[in-house]
């Protein structure tokens, strides 16, 4: 991170023993000292409007958009150039890396708008975590003037829309997902035992729709009204 000028590191649910003993490379002790530690991924990504995950595609076929590294880097740069109006210090975009052992889980990926694919040899598609971070950050830093493609590519996976300053934050999408889930439970739509997969599918759907903030407010108003009507019909205040 220090090599390529990145300073904001967020760690989610670290293994306490390893984290307590973590050492930085020469010239980068501030990165570890100032790193923010979060209990949940949702909390770490709360202010972000664009989240791109990373991982090998040899054993999974995610439903999110898959972009090559140069395109993903351009998307991230574009999002980083649109800071929050209320607080310029808050991050607008994040690149998400999984653990060294198993990478990103299906639940982790449900927070992502898309997945970055690093071209590797077919005989060895998986990369060491530190190497993957270095390759991705180098690509983001090396060509600051590169722009994402104007015409979405075609393929089996959905495309990744260009983010704008009107895109909702992860925290806002999570509030909507919670509200929709509550409505689903009130009408017995969520099948017991499938709640986790339903939550993941809902997160992915909301990110694929990419609603702006005005649309988000309308949708939340609609579901709140539905909840109110359901409570009224059941005789609850």
Image (cartoon, grey):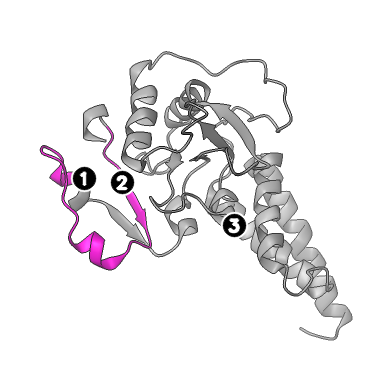
Q: Which residue is mark 1?
A: 31
Magenta segment? 6-31
Q: How many marks?
A: 3
Q: Is residue 125 left or right of residue 162?
A: left
Percent x, y for residue 207? 65, 43
Identify the residue shown where x is 28% and y is 67%: 16
Residue appearing at x 16%, y 51% in the figure: 23
Query: Closer to the observer: label 3 or label 1?
Result: 1
Quadrant in the rendering for residue 13: bottom left
> Is 107 contained in the magenta span?
no
- Name the spot of residue 74 as percent of width and height, x first: 48, 22
Say whether marks 1 and 2 touch (CB < 8 Å): yes
Query: Is the residue under label 1 in contact with that under label 3 (CB below 8 Å)?
Result: no
Q: Nearer the viewer, residue 206 or 200?
A: 200
Q: Nearer the viewer, residue 61 or 147?
A: 61
Give the mark nearer the N terminus: 2 vs 3.
Answer: 2
User: Does dot 3 land on a helix, a strand or a loop?
Assistant: helix
Disc 1 from disc 2: Cα separation: 7 Å
Tell me the crowding category of disc 3: few under 14, some 14 to 19, or many 20 or more residues within 10 angstroms, Cα based: some
Q: What whole-number distance in Å separates the C-alpha atoms at marks 2 and 3?
A: 22 Å
- Residue 49 in the image: x percent, y percent? 52, 41
Query: What residue occupies the far left of the structure in this picture?
Result: 26
Return the disc, 1 or 2, that comes first in the chain's sequence: 2
- The C terminus is located in which quarter? bottom right
CA gap, disc 3 and disc 1: 28 Å
Q: Of the numbered discs in the image, which one, if any, rests on residue 174?
A: 3
Q: Residue 149's image quarter?
A: top right
Instruction: Tell me the SS state at disc 2.
Output: loop
Residue 179 spot, x, y in % from top left: 69, 64
- Residue behind mark 2: 9
Q: Residue furthest bottom?
A: 235
User: In the image, what residue occupies the spot 78% across and 67% down?
Assistant: 184
């Amino acid at each position: 991170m220090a090599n390529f000028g990145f300073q904001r590191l967020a760690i989610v649910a670290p293994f306490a023993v390893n984290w307590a003993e973590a050492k930085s490379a020469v010239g980068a002790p501030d990165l570890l000292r100032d790193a923010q530690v979060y209990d949940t991924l949702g909390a770490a990504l709360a202010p972000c409007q664009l989240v791109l995950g990373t991982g090998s595609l040899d054993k999974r076929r995610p439903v999110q958009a898959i972009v090559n590294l140069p395109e993903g880097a351009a998307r991230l740069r574009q999002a980083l150039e649109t800071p929050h109006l209320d607080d310029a210090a808050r991050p607008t975009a994040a690149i998400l890396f999984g653990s060294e052992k198993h990478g990103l889980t299906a639940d982790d990926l449900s927070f992502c708008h898309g997945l970055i694919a690093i071209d590797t040899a077919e005989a060895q598609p998986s990369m060491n975590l530190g190497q993957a971070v270095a390759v991705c950050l180098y690509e983001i830093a090396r060509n600051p003037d590169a722009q994402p493609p104007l015409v979405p590519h075609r393929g089996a996976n959905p495309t990744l829309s260009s983010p704008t300053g009107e895109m909702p934050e992860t925290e806002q999408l999570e509030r909507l997902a919670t509200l929709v889930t509550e409505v689903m439970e009130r009408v017995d739509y969520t099948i017991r035992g499938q709640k986790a997969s339903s939550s993941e599918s809902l997160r992915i759907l909301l990110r694929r729709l990419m609603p702006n903030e005005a649309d988000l407010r309308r949708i939340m108003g609609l579901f709140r009204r539905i909840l109110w009507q359901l409570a009224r019909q059941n005789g609850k205040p």
